[in-house]
Amino acid sequence: MTEIRNVAADLSRFKRRVVVIALVVLVAFGLLASRLVYLQVVRHEDLAEQAESNRTAIVPVVPNRGLIVDRNGIVLASNYSAYTLEITPSKAGDLEETIDALSEVLEISPRDRRRFKRLREDSRSFDSVPIRTRLSDEEVARFAAQRYRFPGVEIKARLFRNYPNGELASHVLGYIGRINQAEKAAMEDWEDEDLANYKGTEYIGKLGVEQSYEKTLHGLTGVEQMETSAGGRAVRRLAAHPATPGNTVMLSIDIKLQKLVEDMFGDRRGALVAIDPRSGEILAFVSKPTFDPNLFVEGIDIDNWKELSESINKPLLNRALRGTYPPGSTYKPFMALAALQTGKRAPSVVVNDPGYFNFGGHRFGSPEGNIGGVDMRRAIQLSSNIYFYSLANEMGVDLIHDSMKPLGFGQITGIDIGGEVRGVLPSTEWKRNTYKRPEQKKWYAGETISLGIGQGYNAFTMLQLAHATSIVANGGIKLKPHLGLAIRDTVTGDVKPIEQAPAQNLNIPPANIGVIRDGLVAVVNAGTARGVFAGAGYRAAGKTGTAQAVGMAQNTKYNAKALEEHQRDHALFMAFAPANDPKIAVALIVENAGWGAGAAAPIARRVFDYWLMNQYPSEADLAAIQQGKAAAPIGKPRVASEVAWPPAGTQAAASTAP
């Protein structure tokens, strides 16, 4: 049967479909048009920026680090450029296989591998980590020819820090190293402007001046706008804003004097701080033994780190800043000053010194023996233990504490490098807060006696002792000790002194200062240091001291030969010169060297000779000092300003060789 189609119905249905399709097409084109308007008009600027950023990259330009120089302009820290071979772990695949393959192209030692492993542990997977540094041009060319084999491995040209004098003044300068994870976390709390200035920076100051003047030395980061390929490789530079190098930090130390002192210590341990009492400028800041800061620049290897950190001599310890010692008899002049200031004892009061002091059933002895009646000046000159035992007993621990605190003992001096320790200036409150058991918290009267001769709980740094000495030398005017002298602007060349805290007047009567000065001059002229300063072209004031390294029972006779070297007494000396117009104050300790007049005072004498007389010890004299067998200078001293510089054997000397 033939089906009869309804043409009219089919036509109507077709028209409806055409209308629907037309509407769908119209809506689709409307959406496309609206999207086009949105993209081309509304988001034009935003998308144009994105397109430009896909085509270009903004690369930070790390600035050259500023120089560090001494007071005479001698360079102590500089920079050098070198090629490094670096691996980005997230892009390199199997690291062991990559390094093994690289070792077929370039020499990679086991030490390089160990250092890479340690640096990688302190870095993120997308940070590039150096596996080799200081590549030669030949090595760069050799790797470049086979670079296609090593994804995630590249050669970079970097600036490295250089300490041309090696170990000299290392505890002052500190060193720089790669920024570790803890430092990166701490940097997140910085101001946005400061944080932005460290984009691309991988190294930061870790200790000393490098750390405390970090932002001055760092400079201002620049930027480069680079055109990049689809693969992200730089094609050409479109624009650039150059980095501004860091400024030069000028220190107050005299590096030649620093070198002389370090040489005089030789292989012995100890510390010395020399200050200009009129300004607070640090002239020498010595801690022995030292270390080579160049070892840390590229990341110190495990062997060198183990050698430094496990050495019984503790070369990484800044003894001048962090080493605390009983001051021994060098404390006696300050005890005498405290007696005058508090009215506890007049300078004319005579105390009989029979060679012992009885208290609470205990006999406190004295190596000086029976020296008879002594007033304050003679007690300082002859270093009478009995005089100062009795004085400490009369004053009591808390009055001693309150009198010594203004002089800086047991206090942070505020020197402009970090890590300073407070030491211990004992008091009844200190003991209550320090110990746990009730019987330990109590202060016993017998504990006060030994404080008078700088023993007992007393423990101070050489910086504190030098600071206190400079206060007395300066007539009771207290100035903050500092290493930073001025900043030289890298761009303009302008030199701006570093602003220092205002002086503080401790209001010590000149008559009281005079009594102490007279006693100290007598030590040098007719006391324990008279042989050391014989023939000096100036009048000095000073005090020798010997301090126990380990405790000994009362009335036990000291026998150095029966003790291990690290258990023997320390030798100390504090002094200033010229006595009536001081220009330099010194405090030093030679660890386990015994008598202060034999080991410490000769070093101070040569420091004064250098600073005041432009004299440098002869070779024979220098050798005798190193062996602790010197008194007055031996042989004809050299003219200090004519002594060759830079010293032989340093990078600085090698760079100036013809």
Image (spheres, rainbow, N blue to C red):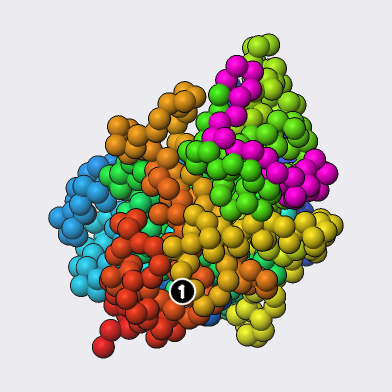
Please state, as top left, top right, bottom left or bottom right, where the N terminus lies in the image: top right
Tell me if residue 377 can be seen.
Answer: yes
- Magenta stretch: residue 348 in it? yes
Residue 8 can be seen in this image: no
Residue extent of the magenta highlight = 334-362
Find numbered disc 1 in the image and state the secondary structure of the residue it sits on.
Answer: loop
Q: Nearer the viewer, residue 334 or 645?
A: 334
- Which amino acid type corresponds to the residue marked 1 in the rendered image? Gly
In which quarter of the view is residue 507 placed? bottom right
Residue 166: x %, y % from top left: 36, 64
- x, y (%) of residue 186? 62, 45
- Quadrant holding the C terminus: bottom left
The percent position of residue 582, horizontal first and vertical second, equals: 65, 70
Residue occupied by mark 1:
535
Q: Which residue is nearer to you in this view: 106 or 185?
A: 185
Residue at left offset 22%, top offset 44%: 97
Q: Residue at x 38, y 58 (%)?
A: 265
Q: Residues within 10 Å of mark 1 (few under 14, many from 20)?
A: few
Q: Is residue 419 left or right of residue 287?
A: right
